[in-house]
Image (cartoon, rainbow, N blue to C red):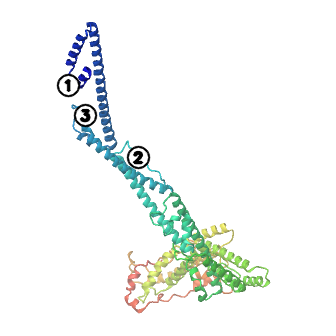
Amino acid sequence: MVTDTESTHLGEITCGTLLQKLQEIWDEVGESDEERDKLLLQIEQECLHVYKRKVEQAAKSRAELLQTLSDANAELSSLTTSLGDKTFVNDIPDKSSGTIKEQLAAIAPALEQLWQQKDERVREFSDVQSQIQKICGEIAGGLSSEVPIVDESDLSLKKLDDFQSQLQELQKEKSDRLQKVLEFVSSVHDLCAVLGLDFLNTVTEVHPSLDEETGVEAKSISNETLSRLAKTVLALKDDKKQRLQKLQELATQLIDLWNLMDTPDEERELFDHVTCNISASVDEVTKPGALAHDLIKQAEVEVDRLDQLKASRMKEIAFKKQTELEEIYVRAHVETNPESARERIMSLIDSGNVEPTELLADMDSQIAKAKEEAFSRKDILDRVEKWMSACEEESWLEDYNRDQNRYSASRGAHLNLKRAEKARVLVSKIPAMVDTLVAKTRAWEEEHNMSFAYDGVPLLAMFDECGMLRQEREDEKRRLREQKKVQEQPHVEQDTAFSTRPSPARPVSAKKPVGARANNGVGANGTPNRRLSLNANQNGSRSVAKEGGRRESLNRPAAPTNYVAISKEEAASSPPVSGAVDQVPASP
């Protein structure tokens, strides 16, 4: 009862009262001092254990609070490092001198705000990386359903800007690729229209998303799609080129056959859609259906029909080609025998031993060879024409120099003076022309291993004979001048004997009579007269009359006073002749 009663009041009793109560009990019981000391020591040990346990619990709690504070500081440092933003650290009040709980209370709001910012930053990174992954998948040709993993160790704005820059570059590349895809699709559409192909089937074979119903953003922009589109466009362009080449060949055949058979314009107009592109380039053909298979087939059928018709008109066509061959040789001054050639064509056609196509092919080959030969002769023939023109001017100049009235003040005399000056310059170039022609002719003969003939006459022989005629003419002129001097000598002596005083000598600066340079244009080999050149007559005969040429040179009548026909208006506006005479040096 005493114990229970004391237990009810235990909360109101201190350690001292308890110890005093214990002493009273021991005194009443009669405990010995040893027993009392033993019990007191036991009480002290038990109290020590209680204090020690409480201290350990308090120390453990403090350690846990310190660990929490350390973790909070580490989390704070990690978040600021990850976010790359240290403004929150600077905003936290300095509580390092306060209690642990005060320090935790100071860090908690900053941690809460950093956690919120981290979550928002993670969402931004995830969104940007998702878009990057999507565009990369579109470029690679496959869409990935995986959620991108965000690296939470670096959530700084700098890294976010890097991802956004990468996203912008990918978006630009996507836009460029989409533009390129649309350009390819447009090219395929235009090519299919020209070639007469189904555009929808062609483009969907590359990728189903390229049809017209699919939106622009949904079209495939992968590397494979672009590669297949480029190959498709290239194949269509190559097909277009081949078809155009074939159509142009057919158009050329049609025009040749029409020209051979004199097809009327009404029939030709039926194939204007074929012949209109005969000289067009690949890029110039843009009309829908211009290179369709049906159109090419139609042209092939027409060519076959005309070929069959050509076989029935073989003689007429063959004679046309023979006429073309003869015209080429005439322009090239090559002598031929057209009568025998036509007889041969008639005999081949009548005998039936040769196919019409083979005969025409042989004649086309002859025409091609004739054109090649004419081209190889062109340079020499052009120089021969210039040489002959120079010879004509030389002949005119000789007639002009023999005219005693060439300095008279007649109408057009000054024009003749100008022509004479030009003729002298041209005549002075004749020897060089001849030397060049001889060199080129010999080179041509060595290259072709045959003689160069001009209308059947060897050109080198023509030059040699003209040179001899020129030398003979020069010798004859020299003989006549000497004879004239001998005949004039007695008259000079007689005039000297009967004259009362000698005539004043002509001053050095006096104007010399016309003809001083009459022989300046004469080269060392002489200047041949074009009228002495060997030209063919209608019967094919060629000849050179040497003696007749000399008589023509010696007995040629004097040229008329006026060599140039001019109108009255030109004569009225012409300068006086005396001014033109001063430009002509005197003749010896």
Q: Residues within 10 Å of mark 2 (few under 14, many from 20)?
A: some
Residue 116 drawn at (x, y percent): 31, 46
- Give the amino acid at mark 2: Val
Residue 263 x %, y %: 63, 87
Q: Are marks 1 and 2 in contact (CB under 8 Å)?
A: no
Mark 3 element type: helix
Q: Which residue is pictured at 66% across the width and 69% down the height?
A: 445
Q: Mark 2 highlights which residue?
A: 150
Examine the image and state in which quarter residue 251 appears.
Answer: bottom right
Residue assigned mark 1: 12
Q: Could you tell me if residue 86 is visible in this image?
A: no
User: Helix, strand or loop at disc 2?
Assistant: loop
Task: Using the numbered discs, state the Cα–Cα distance from disc 1 to disc 2 in whole angstroms.
Answer: 64 Å
User: Horizontal and vertical percent for residue 299?
Assistant: 63, 79
Of the 4 image quadrants, the one containing the N terminus is: top left
- Asked whether disc 2 touches disc 3, contact meaning CB atoms under 8 Å apart, the reply is no
Which marked residue is nearer to the observer: mark 2 or mark 3?
A: 3
